[in-house]
Amino acid sequence: MKRKVSVAPMMDCTDRHERYFLRLISKNTFLYTEMIVDEAISRGNKKKLLEFNINEKPVALQLGGSSPKLLAEASRVGEEFGYDEINLNLGCPSKKVEKNRFGACLMKEPNLVADCLVKMQSKTKLPVTIKTRIGYDNVEDYEHFYNFISILKQTGVKTFIIHARKAMLGKFTPKQNLNIPPLKYDYVYRLKKDFPNEEIIINGGIKSVEEIKAHLEKTDGIMIGRAAYHTPYLLAEIEKEIFKNNNVPSRQHIIEQLIPYIKDEIKKGTRINQIMRHTLGLFHGQNGASHWKKYLSENMCVRDADVQKIDHIMDKIKYKKIEQRVG
Ligand SMILES: Cc1cc2nc3c(=O)[nH]c(=O)nc-3n(C[C@H](O)[C@H](O)[C@H](O)COP(=O)(O)O)c2cc1C
């Protein structure tokens, strides 16, 4: 089952470079793009917004929007670009997003969401999935959540990703909305019992393999956000423990594999920090991890980096030293 473990869509985090990097660590996790707004796809530079490296697959494109027409068109374009799934964001609580009528505020408009999902599915053969919360503001009873999912299910959507806390619309900052409303995993477990034939993925606050194992007893899959970003080598542990893959690369090997990608990207005009910023947490928890972070912070912002400079920087990077100390 391909969505057993996935990495959450995260703005400014899960761009194509992060996904390429994570894929070097883990072959089996399912990856998501950052949220991309339907209108940006319609009016903007599609190639710049949507192109990705084939090695990142499987990757889902997450869309934001509430126009059935624009979302349908964006889904079609997403399929053309080679994505494996189209996901609709019904969980983002930011004020800006609410003003534009997408994200978590759409939980107030299930019929509009259903309309969007029908149109999206009519324009793509890819699975169309949703990511939502368990409620919003004072609307937090299980029955309301159940009814919301029931309406969406009638459109033919089979996969529901649930961030197991409610959204406080317009009241909290996005950061507060990721931490303050309490996690209610039991809502998601109950949803799985009520919809045994649908794929129910749980998200929110998951940080360890033990937690993952416990959630997998009661749901079909888990999605990890911040822990995967800040401690990416957790995905290696997941490969070993959850996917029983004993062929997991070392941290050093991951960086070595990243170098040809960096060189290639530099030639296309990418700056080294656009890639390396995602690797800051690679040695998290290891002796000497602070050397890695410090060295990167001081050196990854070089301007006009050319391939020689990258070689020089990579030679100097202290990862070898770190690995030796770790043993
Ligand atoms: C920096 C950041 C950006 C995020 N951007 C998105 C986004 O674009 N779309 C989305 O559905 N959720 C977004 N989220 C929410 C995450 O997908 C996830 O639901 C949330 O972080 C809870 O999971 P976690 O506790 O494992 O981090 C974002 C979260 C963070 C921390």
Image (cartoon, rainbow, N blue to C red):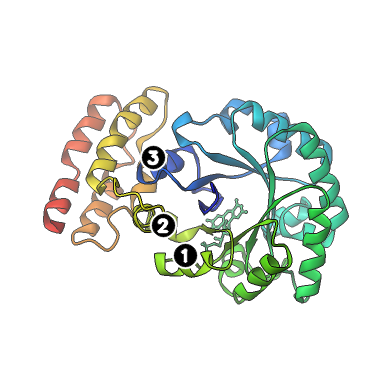
Q: Which residue is mark 2?
A: 242
Nearer to us of marks 3 and 2 is 2
Q: Quadrant of the C terminus?
A: bottom left
Q: Amino acid at mark 3?
A: Ile
Q: Residue at x 82, y 39 (%)?
A: 119
Of callouts 1 and 3, which one flags the residue occurring earlier in the amino acid sequence? 1
Q: Residue at x 50, y 58 (%)?
A: 225
Q: Label for residue 212? A: 1
Q: Are marks 1 and 3 in contact (CB under 8 Å)?
A: no
Of callouts 1 and 2, which one flags the residue occurring earlier in the amino acid sequence? 1
Distance Cα–Cα, label 1 vs label 3: 28 Å
Q: Amino acid at mark 1?
A: Ile
Q: Position of residue 215 (x, y in %)?
A: 52, 67
Q: Which residue is mark 3?
A: 275
| Left or right: 4 in relation to 326 | right
Element on which disc 1 rests: helix
Q: Residue at x 75, y 45 (%)?
A: 65
Q: Position of residue 241 (x, y in %)?
A: 36, 58
Q: Position of residue 1 (x, y in %)?
A: 54, 48
Element on which disc 3 rests: helix
Q: Quadrant of residue 289?
A: bottom left
- Outermost residue on the front side: it is 197
Frontmost residue, 136 versus 154: 154
| Left or right: 80 in relation to 227 | right
Q: Position of residue 193 (x, y in %)?
A: 69, 68
Q: Quadrant of residue 209?
A: bottom left
